[in-house]
Amino acid sequence: MSASLHDTLRTVLGAAPERDITPGEFIRFGGRNRPLWVRLFTDGRAAVFGDWRDGGSHTWTEGGRQMDPAERAAARAWAEQQRRQREAEQRAAWAKNAADIALQWSRARPLVPGDPVTIYLKNRLGVALWPLPAALRYVPALPYFGEDGKEVGRFPAMVAAITSPAGELLALHRTYLTRDGRKAAVPGPVKKLSRTCGPLPGAGIALWSEPDDRGVIGVAEGIETAMAASYGGRMPVCAAYSAGALAAWQWPAGTRRLIVWVDHDEAGADAAAKLRARAQRAGLAVLTKTPQQPGMDWCDVVQRNTEQKERQA
């Protein structure tokens, strides 16, 4: 019985609890990034389960039999109860996170020439840009936590504000650095996203929040790529912070033409195609720009062009 339910969970949700499911018990599983749940009814003959990310629910019955009316009603009521409870928990978590994020952002420093962030961006692009967007700030000693939750150390960091299409601060994107503007030698990802205080689909890092006077704006996956695209393309460019966020990014009001600056890799190309299709359905003219060589991004292109100009000078 329990094995059959486990098999169904793996088929439908892609995961199942690593232990037996006790009748009458409510179990959460899947970890922070996969908020899955299941409840086996007290008779052990039926269950309701789901994924809080999409808000849907599914049912299972022993032997594949049809649920009777009482079981169907119980399953619907339980799923609805869990949906309401999850929404209340999410609102409470977002409210707490909002206060923490606002405090962290207020403590971050505006950029000044010569700080580790400006040096880092110069190293990545091969050219010094100034002024830099207000959506970027600097923290001199930001804690870095390992997978075990323990602090590994404190590092200079570039901190970027991830905002909703309405301009609400939703999360912080952190890039850990050295004092001489290199990526820090940390035991995990050098770039991390903070906890969030609202839904992220459509959000991004508004390096420039409005299109230019022609109605043109660009978007790129990462901060550095967006800065390079803005410099090379002479246009305002936003950063989506990840391939998934690029596909869901929402352009600002007044946009008539969208330029998508794509990294030359499969994930970037797929995300750009999804964004392009959505923007074209909305009536925008869309142009996709990709570096010629596989594996290159627009920072590489700008740096190469800068070096060529310096050799020719």
Image (spheres, rainbow, N blue to C red):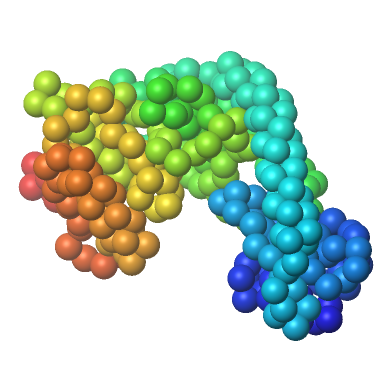
Does residue 131 lie above or below 176 as drawn? above
Residue beneath the point at 23% across and 52% down: 277
In the displayed structure, does residue 194 sit left or right of residue 261? right
- Measured as percent of width and height from the top left, residue 118 is found at 41, 30
Q: Quadrant of residue 194?
A: top right
Q: In this rendering, does residue 53 appear at all?
A: no
- Measured as percent of width and height from the top left, residue 59 is found at 69, 65
Residue beneath the point at 71% across and 33% down: 88
In the rendered view of the protein, which quadrant contains the N terminus?
Answer: bottom right
Residue beneath the point at 22% across and 44% down: 279
Q: Quadrant of residue 165?
A: top left
Residue beneath the point at 36% across and 41% down: 249
Does residue 234 lie above or below 302 as drawn? above
- Measured as percent of width and height from the top left, residue 154 is found at 68, 37
Q: In this rendering, does residue 161 appear at all?
A: yes
Q: Nearer the viewer, residue 200 or 26?
A: 26
In the displayed structure, does residue 176 sit left or right of residue 164? right
